[in-house]
Structure formats: C-alpha cells, structure tokens
Image (cartoon, rainbow, N blue to C red):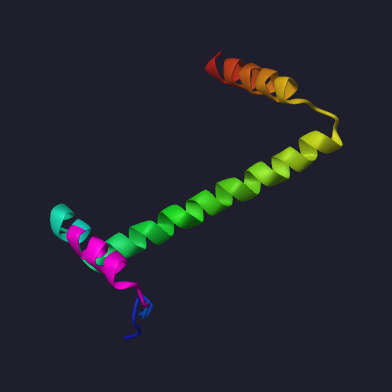
Amino acid sequence: MPRKSSVLSISLPPDLASNLDSAARKEHRSRSELVREAVRQYLLLARWRSLREKATLKAVEQGLKEKDIERLVDEERSARRR
C-alpha cells in the first residue's frame, strides 16, 4: 500500500530547531504537525498575496484609486448582507 504522505528531510539552525521542539512540547503536538501547519499557513498567505497582486494590477489597469476600491468593497459587502 503506497504512503499517503511524502517524507521530507529539512535542516534547521539549532536555535530554530530548539524553538520548534519547545513549541511542540507546549502545544502537545509533534514537530511534523507544527511544520505541516506552518507550510499550510505559508501557502495560504502566498495565495492571498498572489490574488492581491493580480487585483492591484487590474485596478491600476482600470484607473481605480484606493478610495474607489474601498468604496467598491463596501458596496459589495452591503449587497451581500441584503
């Protein structure tokens, strides 16, 4: 039966490894759990950054200013509440 996860080997500086171990003990979690969560958070943040960059470029192409974007977001939020 094939593995359902990939095994990675990473190198950490001693102080970072020690901090990881401390956090794992404090949270009663394994190193792997903490690293998986860190990778998930990083990838989520990277996706948000990418979306924000694309939205910014589109706004600039359309000649929108920051106040226009704030207004459009407020209008969209109001419309969704109705």
Q: In this rendering, would 23 be left or right of 75?
A: left
* In front of the other: 64 or 11: 11
Residue sitting at x 85%, y 33%: 62
Quadrant in which residue 32 is drawn: bottom left
Query: In the image, 17: left or right of 58?
Result: left
Q: Main secondary structure of the magenta part?
A: helix
Whether 67 is drawn above or below 2: the answer is: above
User: In the image, 49: left or right of 19?
Assistant: right
Task: Please say whether residue 39 is one of the residues in the magenta stretch.
Answer: no
Closer-to-camera residue (77/71): 71
Q: Position of residue 68 (x, y in %)?
A: 74, 21
The magenta-colored residue range is 11-22
In the displayed structure, would residue 73 be above or below residue 41? Answer: above
Question: In which quadrant will I find the C terminus?
Answer: top right
Residue visible at 35% across and 84% down in the picture: 2
Residue at 57 percent of width and 46 percent of height: 48
Quadrant of the image occupied by residue 10:
bottom left
Residue 4 drawn at (x, y percent):
35, 75
Q: Quadrant of the N terminus?
A: bottom left
Q: Position of residue 38 (x, y in %)?
A: 37, 58
Q: Is residue 67 above or below residue 26?
A: above
Number of numbered discs visible in the structure rendering: 0
In the displayed structure, 6 sits above or below 47; it is below
